[in-house]
Amino acid sequence: MALTVDERFELIKRNTEEIVKESELKKLLKTKKKPVVYWGTSVTGRPSLAYFFPLLKLSDFTKAGFKVKVLLADLHGALDGTPWIVLEHRYDYYKGAITQIFKALGTDLKNIEFVKGSEFQLKPEYSYDVLKMASMNSINDCKRAASEVVKFGNNPNTGGLIYPIMQSLDEQYLDVDVQFGGIDQRKILMFARENLPKIGYDARIEVMTPMIPGLVGKKMSSSLPKTKIDLTENEKTIKEKINKADCVAGDPDNGVMALLKYVIMVLKKDRKEMFVVERSIKYGGNLDFVDYESIEKSFRKKELHPLDLKNAVAKEISILLDKINKKKLNELGKKAY
């Protein structure tokens, strides 16, 4: 049975931080039969478990009747520090990893299209528009827009300043209605809405999701393995990392609870499954939860112990990552990293 416009809107909106603008999205859903959304990722560090969150949102877009374009931004990766010599191998790794995540999520791949950035970003008309937009923005404009995304350091490369201009133009050259990204991309997405009309193109709708905190500290980092779980980790390593994760009793502001909220419980809810926390009889026996809200309530009241929660989350992550062909990814990883 087809979803209504309101149901499609709510599906897209769930677990988002901001939509600019909601009124534009509602109008799009009413007027266009098959809208197009794109999500881009630059080919830098290894994709981790955190990638399940944006790809789960892209699955929501497909269920809401969208065509999804996944931009594997090889040139953006080079502008953000990936050595040019391994760009092609990084692209292969990302495509393989993302395809496997989609399969693990049960996403309908017929509405997913992979696009390689350099295949259209090196065309003369694209380069012309990059120069045109560059002439309308200062160094400070570009640096401010990219500050949350690009690693600038004390002596930034010029490439990082081109990054937001290219990401803006990608919306036009990929011919999309919506760009989807994390809230860390907000300044670039607003830069795009402001600048595309200046060179005669339409501003697009921007959909943003919150950032998932790291297992240790506030942010996942590709250079700090303890903050994240790699797609090729084994069950023993997953359990060790989850057990060492920040998770103070009664305080849900941590990476373990975020994985529950934005990945595990979304899948459980869609599949009409319970989240089971296994405990021995002497500690009260198993706990069954139907939604994230009830887990958080129990955790805040300290009825659910952090160690019991961690064991249950580690088990769910292991089940999820068992669907990944780790051998194939490790082979691709040898060339890419």
Image (tube, helix red, strand yellow):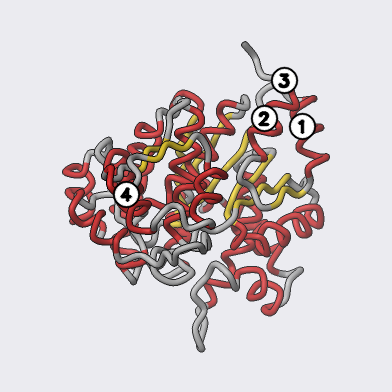
Which residue in the structure is indicated by mark 1? 28
Percent position of residue 223, x then y: 34, 71
Of 23 and 262, nearer the camera is: 262
Numbered disc 1: secondary structure: helix
User: Residue 4 has which mark?
Assistant: 3
Disc 1/disc 2 C-alpha distance (Å):
7 Å
Q: Are marks 1 and 2 in contact (CB under 8 Å)?
A: yes
Earlier sequence position, callout 2 versus callout 3 = 3
User: Measured along the vertical axis of the image, is residue 139 above or below residue 309?
Assistant: below
Residue 230 image offset from top left, x and y in percent: 30, 55
Question: Where residue 260 appears, x then y in whole percent?
Answer: 46, 47
Q: Which residue is mark 4?
A: 283
Amino acid identity at mark 4: Tyr
Q: Amino acid at mark 3?
A: Thr
Q: Which residue position holds label 2? A: 35
Q: Give the alpha-carbon distance from disc 2 to disc 4, as whole Å.
A: 51 Å
Q: Which of the two discs, 3 and 1, sits closer to the camera? A: 3
State which mark lies toward you, 2 or 3: 3
Q: Tell me the crowding category of disc 1: few under 14, some 14 to 19, or many 20 or more residues within 10 angstroms, Cα based.
A: some
Q: Residue at x 46, y 57 (%)?
A: 42
Q: Earlier in the sequence, mark 3 or mark 1?
A: 3
Q: In which quarter of the view is residue 13 placed?
A: top right
- In 3D space, how far apart are the residues under numbered discs 3 and 4 (Cα atoms)? 46 Å
Which mark identifies residue 332?
A: none
Q: CA distance from mark 3 to mark 1?
A: 13 Å
Q: Residues within 10 Å of mark 4 (few under 14, many from 20)?
A: few
Whether residue 335 is visible here, answered yes or no, is no
